[in-house]
Image: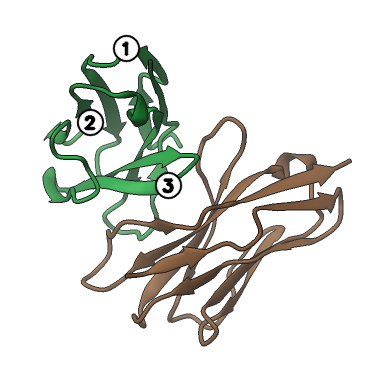
Amino acid sequence: AQTVTQSQPEMSVQEAETVTLSCTYDTSESDYYLFWYKQPPSRQMILVIRQEAYKQQNATENRFSVNFQKAAKSFSLKISDSQLGDAAMYFCAYRSAVGGSQGNLIFGKGTKLSVKP
Amino acid sequence: DARVTQTPRHKVTEMGQEVTMRCQPILGHNTVFWYRQTMMQGLELLAYFRNRAPLDDSGMPKDRFSAEMPDATLATLKIQPSEPRDSAVYFCAISPESLDTQYFGPGTRLTVL
């Protein structure tokens, strides 16, 4: 069974600085997808970024980028120029691509990010 | 996400009562997932449907939980009878047929007293 581990329960960053959230996963599959979701106090789950395992190029969405290391099974999220609105819980998630798409997500326990003004 | 709505947003009920939660995906999103979020267990899958047929409900306590999708724009999750340990946030998520990404509804916060 696949597992996702987020080893940092809480992180803190100064506004305008850069922070990296860690995520590792365990799988025997070669084809899968990885995601980062953000959950602010409103508890809405918001997709931040996605990565296909077959792509070597790291995904980027504006101030958010990932460092995907497939061999190491590592998928970290970098937030540049941190803003107060980035304060939230961040969840790393894995989805198998075996048998086509539409499989369920497996989540890590989350990292609570605080942004200091 | 505007692709899916959930009702009610909050529900407080007493132990033993029936609870029904609704998820309304926009047409074209043919896979619907139910997740539960608790402090102890985090986010975990309860069940999911594709083209209205249940594909996996192994995460659901069968004796009290039931999930259905009566039509393409409505999915329901029922708990009968409810127990205090069912208190959690229940999310519905949808996945467009052509994409691999899941989009979440706003969630239903359930409190069972």
Q: Residue furthest bottom?
A: A71
Q: Is residue B29 visible?
A: no
Q: Picture quarter containing residue B67?
A: top left
Q: Earlier in the sequence, mark 3 or mark 2?
A: 3
Q: Quadrant of residue B10?
A: top left
Amino acid type for the residue under numbered disc 2: Leu
Q: Measure the C-alpha gap from mark 3 to mark 2.
A: 16 Å
Query: Residue beneath label 3, please?
Result: B43
Q: Colour of chain B?
A: green
Chain letter of the residue beneath label 2 in the structure image:
B
State whether residue A25 is above or below residue A36. below
- The residue labelled by disc 1 is B14
Number of numbered discs on residues:
3
Pointer 1 local density, CA inside 10 Å: few below 14, some 14–19, many at least 20: some
Is the C-beta separation of discs 3 and 2 under 8 Å? Answer: no
- CB under 8 Å between discs 1 and 2: no
Image colour for chain A is: brown
Q: What chain is tagged by disc 1?
A: B
